C-alpha cells in the first residue's frame, strides 16, 4: 500500500473535523487485500473512532446501518466484488454519508467485478464534495520480499538464491501462493535443503489449485481448451500460440481467450502474453485434461515452440515425449544438448542427457548418439556422480559400436581420474580405451594416450608417463587432427614442467593460444593452466599470474569451466606460498562451497585451508581440512598436493611429540614421491620427513632421503625444491650436532638454515623464509646454551603463586635434563653446549625477533607464539627490571595471554606445553588464571572473551 494513502487515512481518523476519506484497494486473488484491512484496523486507536467490518456477500457480514455513520468511523469493506446489487446500493449510501473524522477502505478483485473498473457496481455513484477518494493497487512480491518470507518459515539455510528464485518464479510473487508453498516445503521430508528441484517437486498448494480449477470450470466446454493450452505451454504465450495449441481456430480461439480473461482463468502477464497469474497452477489444470486430448495439445505445443527463434529444443523435446513421439523427443534432446554445449552451458547439457539416458527403453542407436555427447560435456564441464554411473553402465552394452564404446570409455577414464580422483580405476579404464581406439584407428586414440601422460596421479612412474608421451605424439601426428595435437601438447607441457625439463618453457610458447578453433583453444587453455600449476610447485611465482590470467580468459572464451575452476585452485596455492594470507581462509571455503559436488576439484583449497589452520594453531581444524573433511581420501590426492598435506600432518604429529608415528607417516609419504620420480614434488615433504626420521633415530634413512632428493633434482631449475633441499640438509645437520653434542655442528646447521632462508626470500616465500630463519636462530641459541643456568621447576605451585610469569632468562618449564628439549613446531632440540660468539647470539636473537614479527604479520599465531617462547628462554633480562615476577593481578600476564591464545585455538595442554617449553601442569595453571581474570566459563568461552 502506498504511503500517501495510508497517511490520508490516519489523518482523517486523527481529527474529528477532517474531511472523510474513501480508499479503494485493488488486488487480484492472493495479493493480500484482507491482510491489508487487518493492518488498517490496527492503526493507532482513538476512543472516538469506531472500527466496523463489512464482509460482502456473507450473510450477517454487514454492520447495522442505523446511526453508525453519525460518529467518526473506520469502515473496512472486504471483497466488494462479491456483493450483489442490493448490497452495493446500501454500501453506496453508507459511503456517501461518511462523517468528518471517518474513513473507509474498500477492497476488490478487479477480475471478478460485475462491471469492469467499477467496484461499486454499474450504477454510477455520486461522491459528496467533501469526500476524498483515493485508489491503490496491490502488486506481487519481488524476490527480496519472497526471501524474507522464506527466511521466516524455513530459516536462513533454506533461503538460497536458487530456492528464492524458484519460489518467486513458480508463485508469480503472489503472497498467498508464496505462504502456502512455503508451508508445504516446511513439512517436507527429508528436510528442505534449498534447491530449485525441491521447490518444483513440492506440488501445488490447495488454495491456488482450487481457485484455478474453479475458474476453468466456469468456462463452457467450447472455451476450456484454450486454458488447457496455456497449462500445457506452462509459461507466457502469445495469442496465436495459445489458439494454435488449443486447436480451436482463429475466431473461436479469440473468443475463448476473451472468456478466459473475463473469468480470470488466465491473466495478461505482459503485452500480448497470456498465462496463469500463479504459474504453478498450470500442472493442476494440466492434470485434469483427458489423456488423449493432452497428448494432442503437447504435439501441437511442440510444433508451436519449434517456430520460435531461437528454438527451445529442450522444451520441444519434453512436449514430443509427452505426446508419445519418442524418436522426435530424442532428436530434440540431441539438438538441445548440442546447442547448450556450443554456448558453454555444459551443466545444462549434462543434466538433460543424464535424465534422458536414465529413462527406460532408449534404443542402442539412440544411446550411441547421446552417450558420447554426455561424456564430452561432462569432461569439459563439471562432473556429476550420475554421469559416471550412466557411462559405466553404457560401456558394458555389447551392442555399442567399438568406436563409440572406446570414446565413452575414454571420457569415463578422464572423469574418474581428473574429476573424481579415482586414479587407479581411471588409469585402467584409459589403458583399455587406448587399446580399443587404436584397434578401430580412431583419432581419439591419441587423446587416450595423452591422458596417460599426465603425471599427477599416484602410481605410475615418470618413465611410464614418458613412454605414453612417445605413443601419443606418434598417434597425433598420424591422424593430423590439430585439436588432438594440441591436447597432446597440453599434457606434454604438464609433464615437462613437472620435472623441470629444460625444454618446458619452449613447449608452453608453442601452445596455439590464438587459435580460432574452440577445440584447440580449450586444449591450449588447459596447457596454460597446467603450466601455471607446475610453475607454482617449482617456485616460479613471478610467472604464475600471467599464465593463469591468459589461461582463464582462454578457458572462458572457449567454454571450459573445469579448466577455469582448476585455475582457481592454483591461485589459492600461489597466494599461500607468496604470503597473500589476508582473506585466504574465506576464499578457500568459498571455493570449496562452489565446488561442493566435485570434492577432488576443491582439493587445493582444502589443503591450503589446512595449512593455514596449522600456522594459526587450530590443530583440530587443520586435521579436518587436510583430510578433506571426509569428502575425499588424501591417499587419492595428486602427488604434489598429497606430499604437501603429508608434510603438514607430519609436522603436527612431531609437535605433539608422537615421533614414531611421524616417522611412519614420513616413510609412507616418501614412498609415493619416490615411486613417481618427480623430485621437485618432494619439496613440501622433505624437511618434515627428514626431521621425523632423524628424531626417531633413523639417521640412515634420513640421509638416504636427502641423498635421493639431491640426486633426483640433479641440475634441474626448480627453485622451491632447491631451497627445500638446503632446508632438509640443515635439519639433518642440526639433529646430528645435537645427538653428538657438537656446538660447531649447530653453527654449521645455522648457516644452512640461513642459506635456505635466503633462497626462499628470492622466490619469495615469506612463511618458509621465516621458518628457516627461526631454525638458524634456534641453532645459534642451542650452541650458546652452555651458559644458561638451571631454571626452577615451574611445576612447583609455589613458583606460580603470583602471576605465573617465568623470570627473564628462565626456560619456562625446562629443567637441566630438558635443555635438549624439543622446540615445538620444529621439533629439534636445544642442546647444552659451550658458549658461542656473543655477537652471533645477539644476531640470532634479532633474527628471531624479526621472524616472530613476520609470523605475526602473516597471521601465523602458533609460529609467532613459539618463536617468542624461544626468545624468552634466552633473552637477557631488561635493564632496570626489579627481581621477582611482575604483578598482573587484574590483567593477563604475557605468558597467560600466549597460553590462552593457543588454548582458544584448540590446542591441548600437552601441545601448548610443547610449543612454549612449559610443563602441562604449568599450562593448566595459566589457563585457570586466564579464565579467572576474563570471567570465562570454558576454554571455548575463553576464545570469545579474548
Image (spheres, rainbow, N blue to C red):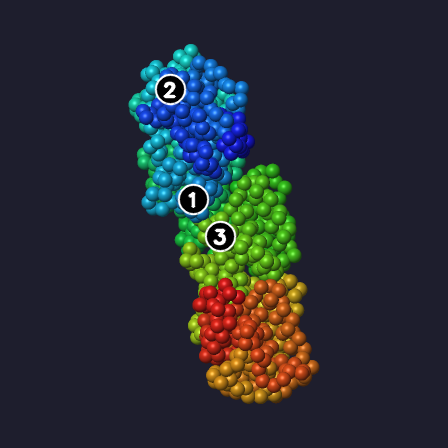
Q: Residue furthest top?
A: 251
Circles 3 and 1: CB distance less than 8 Å?
no
Residue shown at the point (38%, 16%) measured from the top left? 85
Q: Say whether disc 3 or disc 1 marks the residue closer to the N-terminus.
A: 1
Circles 2 and 3: CB distance less than 8 Å?
no
Q: Position of residue 219 (x, y in %)?
A: 35, 18
User: From the viewer's perspective, is residue 212 above or below residue 578?
Assistant: above
Q: CA distance from mark 3 to mark 1?
A: 28 Å
Q: Which mark is residue 666?
A: none
Q: Which mark is residue 592?
A: 3
Q: Which residue is more in the foreground, 716 or 215?
A: 215
| Residue carrying label 2 | 87
| Residue carrying label 1 | 152
Which circle, 2 or 3, is nearer the viewer? Answer: 2
Q: Position of residue 600 (x, y in %)?
A: 46, 53
Q: Secondary structure at mark 3?
A: helix
User: From the viewer's perspective, is residue 191 above or below residue 701?
Assistant: above
Q: CA distance from mark 2 to mark 1?
A: 40 Å
Mark 3: give few (<14), some (14-19) or many (20+) Cα within 10 Å: many
Q: Secondary structure at mark 2?
A: helix
Q: CA distance from mark 2 to mark 3?
A: 64 Å
Mark 2: give few (<14), some (14-19) or many (20+) Cα within 10 Å: some
Amino acid at each position: 500500500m502506498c504511503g500517501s494513502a495510508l497517511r490520508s487515512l490516519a489523518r482523517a481518523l486523527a481529527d474529528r473535523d477532517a474531511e472523510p476519506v474513501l480508499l479503494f484497494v485493488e488486488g487480484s486473488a492472493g495479493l493480500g487485500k484482507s491482510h491489508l484491512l487487518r493492518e488498517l484496523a490496527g492503526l493507532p486507536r482513538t476512543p472516538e473512532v469506531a472500527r466496523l467490518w463489512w464482509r460482502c456477500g456473507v450473510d450477517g457480514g454487514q454492520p447495522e446501518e442505523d446511526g453508525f455513520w453519525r460518529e467518526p468511523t473506520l469502515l473496512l469493506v472486504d471483497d466488494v466484488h462479491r456483493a450483489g446489487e442490493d448490497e452495493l446500493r446500501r454500501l453506496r449510501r453508507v459511503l456517501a454519508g461518511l462523517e468528518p473524522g471517518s474513513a473507509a477502505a474498500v477492497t476488490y478483485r478487479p477480475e471478478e467485478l460485475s462491471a469492469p473498473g467499477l467496484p461499486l457496481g454499474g450504477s454510477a455513484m455520486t461522491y459528496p464534495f467533501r469526500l476524498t477518494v483515493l485508489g491503490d493497487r496491490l502488486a506481487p512480491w519481488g524476490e527480496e520480499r519472497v526471501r524474507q518470507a522464506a527466511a521466516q518459515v524455513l530459516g536462513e539455510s533454506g533461503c538460497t538464491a536458487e530456492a528464492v528464485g524458484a519460489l518467486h518464479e513458480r508463485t508469480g510473487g503472489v503472497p498467498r501462493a508464496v505462504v502456502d508453498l512455503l508451508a508445504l516445503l516446511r513439512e517436507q521430508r527429508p528436510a528442505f535443503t534449498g534447491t530449485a528441484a525441491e521447490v518444483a517437486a513440492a506440488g501445488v498448494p490447495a488454495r491456488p489449485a482450487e481457485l484455478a480449477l474453479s475458474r476453468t470450470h466456469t468456462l463452457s466446454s467450447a472455451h476450456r481448451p484454450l486454458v488447457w493450452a496455456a497449462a500445457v505451454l506452462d509459461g507466457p504465450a502469445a495469442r496465436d500460440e495459445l489458439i494454435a495449441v488449443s486447436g480451436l481456430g482463429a475466431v473461436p480461439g479469440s473468443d475463448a481467450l476473451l472468456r478466459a480473461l473475463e473469468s480470470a482463468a488466465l491473466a495478461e502477464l505482459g503485452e500480448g502474453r497470456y498465462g496463469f497469474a500463479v504459474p504453478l497452477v498450470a500442472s493442476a489444470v494440466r492434470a485434469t485434461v483427458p489423456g488423449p486430448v493432452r497428448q494432442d495439445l503437447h504435439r501441437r505445443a511442440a510444433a508451436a515452440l519449434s517456430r520460435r527463434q531461437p528454438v527451445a529444443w529442450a522444451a520441444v523435446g519434453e512436449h514430443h515425449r509427452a505426446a508419445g513421439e519418442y524418436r522426435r523427443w530424442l532428436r530434440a534432446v540431441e539438438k538441445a544438448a548440442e546447442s547448450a554445449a556450443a554456448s558453454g552451458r555444459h551443466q545444462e547439457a549434462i543434466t538433460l542427457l543424464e535424465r534422458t539416458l536414465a529413462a527406460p527403453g532408449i534404443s542402442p542407436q539412440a544411446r550411441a548418439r547421446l552417450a558420447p555427447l554426455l561424456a564430452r560435456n561432462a569432461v569439459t564441464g563439471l562432473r556429476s556422480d550420475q554421469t559416471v554411473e550412466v557411462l559405466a553402465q553404457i560401456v558394458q552394452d555389447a551392442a555399442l559400436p567399438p568406436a563409440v564404446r572406446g570414446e565413452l570409455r575414454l571420457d569415463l577414464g578422464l572423469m574418474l581420474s581428473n574429476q573424481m580422483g579415482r586414479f587407479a580405476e581411471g588409469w585402467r579404464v584409459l589403458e583399455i580405451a587406448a587399446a580399443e581406439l587404436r584397434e578401430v584407428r580412431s583419432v581419439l586414440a591419441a587423446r587416450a594416450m595423452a591422458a596417460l601422460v599426465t603425471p599427477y596421479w599416484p602410481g605410475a612412474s615418470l618413465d611410464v608417463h614418458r613412454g605414453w608421451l612417445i605413443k601419443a605424439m606418434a598417434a597425433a601426428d598420424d591422424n593430423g587432427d590439430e585439436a588432438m595435437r594440441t591436447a597432446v601438447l597440453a599434457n606434454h607441457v604438464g609433464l615437462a614442467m613437472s620435472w623441470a625439463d629444460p625444454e618446458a618453457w619452449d613447449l608452453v610458447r608453442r601452445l596455439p593460444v590464438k587459435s580460432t578453433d574452440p577445440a584447440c583453444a580449450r586444449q591450449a587453455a588447459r596447457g596454460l593452466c597446467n603450466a601455471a600449476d607446475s610453475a607454482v610447485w617449482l617456485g616460479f611465482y613471478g610467472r604464475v599470474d600471467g599464465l593463469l590470467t591468459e589461461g582463464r580468459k582462454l578457458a572462458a572464451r572457449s567454454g571450459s569451466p573445469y579448466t577455469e575452476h582448476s585455475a582457481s585452485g592454483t591461485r589459492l596455492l600461489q597466494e599461500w606460498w607468496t604470503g597473500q594470507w589476508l582473506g585466504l581462509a574465506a576464499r578457500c571455503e568459498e571455493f570449496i562451497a562452489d565446488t561442493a559436488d566435485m570434492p577432488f576439484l576443491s582439493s587445493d583449497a582444502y589443503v591450503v585451508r589446512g595449512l593455514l589452520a596449522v600456522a594459526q594453531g587450530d590443530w583440530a581444524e587443520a586435521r579436518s581440512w587436510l583430510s578433506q573433511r571426509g569428502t575425499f581420501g588424501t591417499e587419492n590426492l595428486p602427488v604434489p598436493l598429497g606430499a604437501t598435506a603429508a608434510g603438514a600432518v607430519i609436522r603436527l604429529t612431531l609437535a605433539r611429540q608422537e615421533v614414531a608415528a611421524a616417522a611412519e607417516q614420513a616413510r609412507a609419504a616418501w614412498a609415493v614421491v619416490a615411486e613417481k620420480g618427480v623430485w621437485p614434488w618432494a619439496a613440501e615433504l622433505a624437511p618434515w620427513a627428514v626431521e621425523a626420521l632423524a628424531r626417531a633415530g633413523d639417521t640412515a634413512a634420513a640421509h638416504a632421503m636427502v641423498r635421493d632428493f639431491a640426486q633426483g633434482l640433479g641440475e634441474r631449475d626448480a627453485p622451491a625444491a632447491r631451497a627445500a633441499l638446503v632446508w632438509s640438509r640443515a635439519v639433518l645437520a642440526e639433529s646430528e650436532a645435537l645427538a653428538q653434542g657438537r656446538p660447531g655442528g649447530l653453527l654449521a646447521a645455522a648457516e644452512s638454515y640461513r642459506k635456505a632462508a635466503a633462497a626462499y626470500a628470492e622466490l619469495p616465500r615469506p612463511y618458509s623464509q621465516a621458518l628457516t630463519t627461526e631454525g638458524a636462530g634456534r641453532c645459534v641459541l642451542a650452541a650458546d646454551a652452555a651458559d644458561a643456568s638451571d631454571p626452577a621447576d615451574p611445576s612447583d605451585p609455589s613458583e606460580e603463586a603470583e602471576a605465573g610469569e617465568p623470570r627473564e632468562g628462565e626456560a619456562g618449564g625446562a629443567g637441566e635434563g630438558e635443555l635438549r628439549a624439543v622446540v615445538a613446531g620444529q621439533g629439534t632440540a636445544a642442546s647444552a653446549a659451550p658458549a658461542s660468539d656473543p655477537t652471533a647470539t645477539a644476531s640470532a636473537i634479532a633474527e628471531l625477533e624479526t621472524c616472530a614479527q613476520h609470523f605475526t604479520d602473516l597471521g601465523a599465531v602458533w609460529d609467532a607464539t613459539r618463536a617468542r617462547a624461544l626468545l624468552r628462554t634466552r633473552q637477557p633480562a631488561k635493564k632496570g627490571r626489579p627481581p621477582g615476577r611482575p604483578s598482573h593481578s587484574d590483567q593477563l600476564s604475557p605468558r597467560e595471554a600466549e597460553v590462552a591464545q593457543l588454548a582458544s585455538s584448540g590446542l591441548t595442554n600437552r601441545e601448548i606445553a610443547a610449543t612454549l617449553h612449559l610443563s602441562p601442569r604449568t599450562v593448566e595453571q595459566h589457563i585457570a588464571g586466564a579464565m579467572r581474570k576474563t570471567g570465562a566459563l570454558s576454554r571455548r568461552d575463553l576464545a570469545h572473551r579474548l
